[in-house]
Amino acid sequence: MDLSESVAGEEDPGASVDLAMRTPASPGASDQPAGANGARAAGPTPPMAPGDEAPEGTPGTGEDVCRACGGTGILNGSACPECEGTGKVNVGIGGA
């Protein structure tokens, strides 16, 4: 196999071949460093409102206006149950 020239135009012609030639890891093994599964360091999990998709500070998330109350924090004359009266929720951003 000649890896000196790219057929598909990738920057590193041998990169995809290297990945394809790896031997399977043992069951349950990961190529990610320990603790890289998005888990936070030890400690209490920040509180979440029912409308939050993830705790505050989670990578890939951000603050948005609560859809239930439109950001007012009030729904049907009392504190909105989705944002707990803050008018804000933490949601995933970007993605596909």
Image (tube, rainbow, N blue to C red):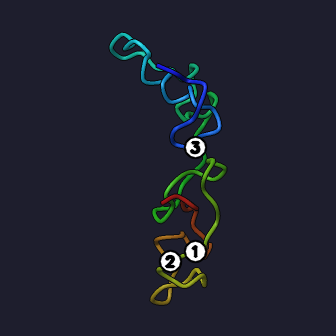
Task: Residue at 51%, 38% (x, y): give it.
Answer: 7
Specify whether 63 is left or right of 78.
right
Give the alpha-carbon distance from disc 1 to disc 3, as whole Å. Answer: 53 Å
Q: Are marks 2 and 1 in contact (CB under 8 Å)?
A: yes
Give the alpha-carbon distance from disc 2 to disc 1, as whole Å. Answer: 5 Å
What number is the disc on residue 9?
A: 3
Q: Position of residue 79 (x, y in %)?
A: 53, 78
Determine the secondary structure under disc 3: loop
Residue type indicated by callout 2: Cys
In the picture of the structure, the residue carrying the numbered disc 2 is 80
Which mark is in front, 3 or 2?
A: 3
Task: Residue at 57%, 35% (x, y): give it.
Answer: 6
In the picture of the structure, the residue carrying the numbered disc 1 is 85
| Of callouts 2 and 1, the N-terminal one | 2
Residue type indicated by callout 3: Gly
Q: Which is nearer the eye, 1 or 64?
A: 1
Q: Position of residue 19 (x, y in %)?
A: 48, 24
Which mark is in front, 1 or 3?
A: 3
Determine the secondary structure under disc 1: loop
The outermost residue toward the left is: 27
Please determine whether, in this image, residue 28 is positioned above or below residue 50: above
Q: Position of residue 82 (x, y in %)?
A: 47, 70
Q: Where is residue 92, by image quadrant?
A: bottom right
